[in-house]
Amino acid sequence: MAAQAVTRIAGLTSTLLVTALPAATDAQIVLLPAAADPLPHLPLAPAPATLTTLLLLLGPSPSSALSLLPRLPPYAHTPLVLTLLLPPASDLAAPLALATALPFALHSTTAQEAQDHQLLAARLARTERKAVLHLVHLSPLEEDSVQELSAHSIATFIAADVRPVNGHSTGNGTRKESTDDPALQALFAAYQLAAAQTLNLVHHALPAYYYHGAPAPHTLLLALGAPLSPLVDALPTAAGEGAALLSLALVRPWPANRLLAAVPESVRRVVVLEQTQKRAKRWSALYLELVAALQSRPHPHRPTLSSATLGRIAPEDGQKVLAQIVRDAEAGAGPNKLYGEPLVAEAPRAPHVPQHEHTYLQLLDTVFPDRLEVVNDPATIASQGAEAARPEYALGVAQARLELRERLVRAVKTLLREGKEHTTGVTDDLHILLAQWVKEQASPGAGALGAQIVGALQALPSASLHPAAHEVLALQEHFASKSRWIINSDTWSYDLGRSGLHHLLASGANVNLLLLDTAPYSSRAAGDPERRKKDAGLYALNRGDVYVASVAVYSSYAQVLQALVEADAYPGPAVVLAYLPYGEDEAAPALDVLKETKRAVDAGYWPLYRWDPAKREPFALDSEAVKADLREFLDRQNHLSLLEAAEQPQIAAALVGSLGQDLLRARQQRVKEAYDALLGGLEGPRVLVMYASDGGAAEKVAKRLAGRARARGLAASFRAMDELSWAEWAADDVRKDGFTLFVTSTAGQGEPPQNGRNTFKQLSAVLSQSAGGEKKPLDELRYAVFGMGDSHYWPRAEDAHYYNKPGKDLDGRLEALGATRVVDLGLGDDQDADGPETGYRAWEPLLWRALGVGDVEVLEAEPEPITNEYIKIASNYLRGSIAEGLRDTTTGALAPSDGQLTKFHGIYEQDDRDIRDERKDAGLEPAYAFMIRVRMPGGVCRPEQWRAISQIADEHGNGTFKLTTRQTFQFHGVIKRHLKPAVQAINRALLDTIAACGDVNRGVLCSALPALSTLHAETYALSKKISEHLMPRTSAYHEIWLDKKQVAGNAVKDMEPLYGPYYLPRKFKIAIAIPPNNDVDVFCNDVGLIAIADEKGHLAGYNVSIGGGMGVTHSNKKTYPRLGDVIGFVKPEEAHLFCEKVMLVQRDNGNRQDRKNARLKYTIDRMGLDVFKKEVEKLLGHDLEPARPYSFENNLDQWGWKQSMDGKWNFTMFVENGRVQDEPGKPYKTGLVDIAKVHKGTFRLTANQHLILAEVDEKDLPEMKKLLAKYKLDNIQYTGLRLSSSACVAFPTCGLAMAESERYLPVLIDKVEKFCEEAGLRNDEIVMRMTGCPNGCARPYAAEVAFVGKAPGSYMMLLGGGFYGQRLNKIYRETVSEPEILAILKPMIKRYALERNPGERFGDWTIRAGYISPVTSGKEWYEGMGGNM
Ligand SMILES: Cc1cc2nc3c(=O)[nH]c(=O)nc-3n(C[C@H](O)[C@H](O)[C@H](O)COP(=O)(O)O)c2cc1C
Ligand code: SF4
C-alpha cells in the first residue's frame, strides 16, 4: 500500500520521475533498467518550478544504495525527492549514510505517513530547491490503508507558493529561537513550514517525532527504524515503567535545541536504537547529533547516552525486550547490543547473466583460454558484494592490478640488476629466466615463465634473499599476462556513465571494455538515447589513441574474433561495442536476434568497424553501410585525409558516399525515365494496370491484360503497385480520364504481395483520415479489381476468410474512398479446373464491355508474353547483357532476363529477405546478393581447393559456405561487384560454375561411400565424364567471367551440338549410386545409374532409372514428385551416352509452354514410359538389357572412421545442414582449413550435406584425429534423428522460400529428439527433411517424414517415405505449425517405439499403423492425402 501511495504522489508532484517501478503519470518518466545507475538521469541544473523524484525499491540488504553516496552531494541543492522504499526489516546503515549527504531526510513507517511525507517532501524540495531523502518502510500489513487525496487538490497544493516573503515560519511559534547554527535553524524552519502546509492539505498532524510513555521518564529510547508498535504497546506496562520512546519522523535537520527540547528534563539515560546491523562507523550521525545537543544540558541533568541495535521484535516479545533495554541501560551495557531477532541481510547473489550475453563471454573464453580476466565477473559478487560487478568499481580494481604488475616488473628488474651480488645470489639459470620474463612479459607464455621463477626463488634460502626477491614472491600472482576485460551489460553491470568511460580512456591503462548494446533495431526509436552504446564508440574514436571496434556476433563472427584479438594486443585502453539486440526478452530466439542484427547493420545503424591506432591504416570498415554520424565524424576529423592519402583513395569515397542515397536517386531517376517514355508512346483512352504479385502469376495476368487492352485500342501501361508513389498516382490524370485496373494475388495468410504492401497501407491510411469527411479522396477514379488466390491454401474452415483477401479488401476500400467500380470484382482460384484462368475468362469480357471496347475485333495476334524460352533464344548462347549489367553500378541487381541467364553460369540473383521490408520502407532497392554454385561432379576436391573455397567465402561472400544436396559448394551473399572476382577465384582453384544451375544438365552426383574404392573410382570417373560430356559448349562463360575474348571478332560462331539454342525445357539431374547405399537418392533424379558389380566385385555396368524429380507447386495438382523407374541395364562405356539420349528425348519432347510441367517426369507420364524408353533405344541404336538384381539398405551417410579396400581411412563428419561456419564452441570452418593445410588425401561432399575426410594414410591417422578433436569435428554423438536430417537453405537468401528451413530444422529437432529419447529411440534413424518451399531442394518427398514450407511458421507435413529412398511420402497435414507438429509427433514416436516390428522403419510403420497410405506412383500422389488419423 505504501509503495502504491508513494508512487502515485511521486507521479502527481514531479516534473520528472526516474524509477524502475511502473507509474501512471503525466510527468516525464525515465524507466530505469534493472541495475541501472539512476544518477545520470537527474538534472543538475533543473529549470525553475520543477521537481525531480527518484524512486527506488531497495532489497533487504540495501548496501547497493551506498554507491550513490559519493556522487550525491552535487544534487543536494537541486529540487529532488529521493524516495527509497525499504522492505520491513531492512538494514538502515546505507540509507542513513545517504541522509548525511542531503539537507533533509524523513522517515515513514505506515502507508498514510508515507503518502503525507511524500507530499511534504515534494513541497519542501520545490520551495527550498533542495534535496529531500524519504525513507519508507514497506509494511507487511495489508490493512495499512491510506486516505487518498484528489489529483486536483495535490496539483493546487504543489503549485501554490505560500512561502512567507520575510523568512521562514517558526512552526507553532512556541519555542524560543536558539543560538544554534543559523543555517540548520533555517532548514528546520523550512521543514516546519512545509509540514504545516501539508497538514492543511491532509488534515493529519505531521509531527517531527512521536512520543510514547511516561511524561517524566528516567530512560528514553530514541528510535529510528521498523514499526515500533511492540515496544509502544509495552510501554504502559510494568516493563516500561519510567521509560518513554521517542521515534523520529524527521531524520534531519535537527538543530541541537530542537532535539534537546524533545528530551524531557527527567531523563537520566538515553538509548539510541538504530536499525543498523552492519555499521560502517561506531557512532551514527544521529547519535553524534544527540551527544552534541545533550552537551548543553547542565551536568547533573545531563543524561548518559548509549546506542544499541534494533532487530525485529515480534508483538508478543515487546514487554520482554523493553524490560531488557531498560535493565541494560541501568546497568550501563555497551554499544552494539542487539535487541530482537537479527535483521536478515541477504547474502549478495551473483546476478543473472542473460543467455544471449553468454555468447560474448564464451567467445572471450575461447580466444583467451588461459589469460582471460573478466574483472567484474559476476561470480565475484558472492565474495565481494554487489559492487564488484559495477564497471566503475572494476576499473579501479583493474588499475590496482596493473599497478601491482608494474611493481612486479620493477622488482624483477631490480633483482636482475642486483640479485647476483646479493648474499644469496640468484643463480645463472634464474637470471636467464628473469631476463626472459622481462622480454616476454606481455606474451601468453609469461605466466609459465613466472611459475619457473617462483620455483627457483623458493628453492633459495628465504632468510637471506634480496628484498626485491621477497617482493617478487609476494606479487607472484601477477606474472601472467592477463587479457583484462570489463563488461558493461544493461542487465547486470550497467552504470558506466560518461565520466566512467572518460576515466578509462584518459587513464591510458591496458584495460579492455566490452560494451553490450541490447536494444533491438526495430524498437530503437523508443530506446533511451543514454543507452546508445554506439555513441560511446564515437566518443572513444574522438580520442584517436584508443582501440575501438564496433562488432555484432550475429553479423560477422570472424570480425568479432579479429576485434577481440586486436583489442587485447593493443597496449592501451580498448573499447569493443558489441551488438546483441535481444531487447527485454531474454528468451528471444537466436533467429530473431540475428534478423534484428542484420537490419541494424544493413541500415547503417550499427556499422561494423575497427580503429586500431597501432596500425598504419588504423580504420577498417567491415560493413557496407555507414551511419551518418560516423560519416560526419570522419568528415570532421582529419582521419579522412589520412585515408585519402593511402594507396586506395576509393575506400574513402566509399566510406563517405551515402550508399543508400545514391542508389535511391539512381533508381528514382530510372523509374521516372521509363515511366515518361511509356507515357510518351501512348495514344487513346488511358488504362493503367497495377499489379501486386509475389510469384509472378498476377504479374503475368496484368501484363497480358495490358497487352489485350492495347490490342483493343486503349493506351495501356502496367506497373507494380508500389512502383508508383501515392503522390505520382494522384498527379497522374489517368485517375480523371482513364481507368485503373488492379490485379493482386494473395500472399502469406491473406496478405497483399510484397510489391503492393505500401499501396495497401496508403489506402488504409487515407481511408481512416477521410472517415466522416464530405469529400471522398478517390471520387474521380474508375476502377476494376481482379484478385488471385487459392481457396484451399489454408484448408481449415476458420481460415476461409484468407481466400483472396487482398482483392476483396482492395475492391471494398476503393469503393469506400468514393471510386467508381466499373465491373464487379473478379476472382481467380488455383483450385478451379484451369486455375485462375477459369475466373479470369469470365471476368475479362465484362471488363471490355464496361470499358466500351467489348465489340472491338482484335485482328492482330496478341503479343506472347516473354518466357524463359524467348530469353534463351535471344541470349546469343547465354550472353544476354550480363557483361553490361555487371558494369552498371547504379543497382545491385542484373536485368531480369540476365538473371535467368546467369543461372546457366551457376549464379542466382537473390536478396536478403530478412531486411527486405526495412529497405523498402527506406526507399532502397532490396539488398541484392548472388548465390554462386560450383560445378564439382561427384563432390570430390583436394585440400588446396578446400582452402581456396574457404577463402573465397571470406573475401567475396558472407564468410560461410554450404555443402549442398548436390555434393557441391554454394556461396551466398556475393554482391555484384564481387561476382566476377569470385568466379575468377573459383576458376583459379581449378573448379568452375558452368551449368551448375539453369535448363541444362546440372552437377552429377556420385555415391560418396569410399569403402568400395574400386567401384567408387570408376563411378566417380563416370560422373566427371558425364558432366564434361553434357556441358554447354558456349564460350560465353569464359568471355564474361574470365575475360577471354571471342576469337577474331566473332569469326567463330558459338553452337550447342547437344542443346541447340533453346537448351532444355527445364533442369536435368543425374546421379550414380553404389548399392547397398543410396546416399545420393538415385530415384529422385531425372536419370539414375545404379552401379552393378560382377561376381568378382568389378563394375559390370549400371541399372538405369528415369523420371525422378522433386519440384511441386502448392495446390497445383498438375505438379507432383516422382521417383525414377528402372528401365534396364547399360554397359559402363555406354552410360554417358545413355544419359545423353534421355536428355535429347526430353529436349525434343518436354513441355516448353509451361515450366511447371516441363521436367522429364511429366514428359514420361505424358508419353508413357514404354514409348519414352523406345525413343531412347532408337537413339542408342539398340534395346536396353534387362535390369540386374540389386538392393539398397539406406540413403544415409556412414558416420565415423571407415577403412576402404586400398587400406586408406575415411572419416565422415556431421556438418549440420551442410553449413560450414565458425560458431561459438564450434570453430568448424577454421578447423577444416587447418586440416586442409596438412591433409594429403581428398575431401568428399555427401549428397546429405555432410563431409568425408577421405584417403588418410594409416600413418597420418593420429595427426588427423588430433586435429578433428581439437576443432570438435569428431563429434558424431548426435541422435539418430539429427544425423538423418537435412534442410535446404531457404531464408534469408533463397528468393523462393516461403518459410524457414536451414535455420529452423535444428531448433525443431531439439524438441523432437526429446520425444525420441523418451521413447528409447536415441540412436534410431528417422529420415526427416525440411524445405522452405515445395521445390524440394533437400529431397523432402523421399524422406520418412518431411516438412515443406507454405508461409512463415507454416508447413505441409508428409509421412510414409521409404527409408532408402524407394517410396515417396504423402501429404499428411496440409498446414501445421510447431505446436501441431509436436502434438502429432510425440504420441506417434511413442507408438512407433512400442509397436514396431523388429527392424521396421518409421516410414513403413506409419503406413502399417494406418496413419497414411503408401504412394505407388507420382501421378497418384494426391490420392488419400490427409492421412487417416
Ligand atoms: C506463401 C503463399 C501464401 C498464400 N496464401 C494465400 C492466402 O492466404 N489466400 C489465398 O487465397 N491464396 C493464397 N496463396 C495463393 C496465391 O495467391 C496464388 O497461388 C496466386 O496465384 C499466386 O500469385 P503470384 O504468383 O502473383 O504471387 C498463397 C500462395 C503462397 C505461395
Ligand atoms: S526448396 Fe525452395 S526454399 Fe529451399 S532452397 Fe530450394 S527453392 Fe529455396
Image (cartoon, grey):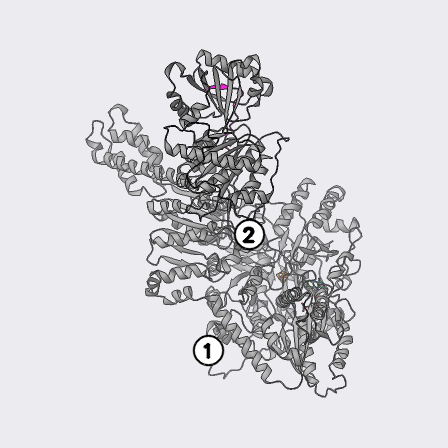
| Residue at horizontal 68 percent and vertical 65 percent from the top | 771
Residue 19 seen in the figure: no
**Which image quadrant for residue 1017?**
bottom right
**Mark 1: which secondary structure?**
loop
Expressed as whole percent of the image width and height from the top left, the position of residue 885 reads 51, 74
Amino acid residing under circle 2: Val
Of the 4 image quadrants, the one containing the N terminus is top right
Q: Which residue is mark 1?
A: 1045
Expressed as whole percent of the image width and height from the top left, the position of residue 732 reads 61, 78
Amino acid residing under circle 1: Lys
Expressed as whole percent of the image width and height from the top left, the position of residue 371 reads 40, 41
Q: Which residue is mark 2?
A: 593
| Residue at horizontal 33 percent and vertical 34 percent from the top | 452
Q: Which residues are magenta?
A: 336-351
Disc number at residue 1020? none
Nearer the camera: disc 2 or disc 1 = 2
Query: CB of mark 2 within 8 Å of CB of mark 1?
Result: no
Between 959 and 25, the one lying in front of the other is: 25
Prevailing secondary structure class for the magenta stretch in the rendered image: loop
Expressed as whole percent of the image width and height from the top left, the position of residue 1236 reads 47, 54
Residue 417 seen in the figure: yes
Residue at mark 1: C-beta within 8 A of ligand 2: no
Between 1290 and 301, the one lying in front of the other is: 301
**Mark 2: which secondary structure?**
helix
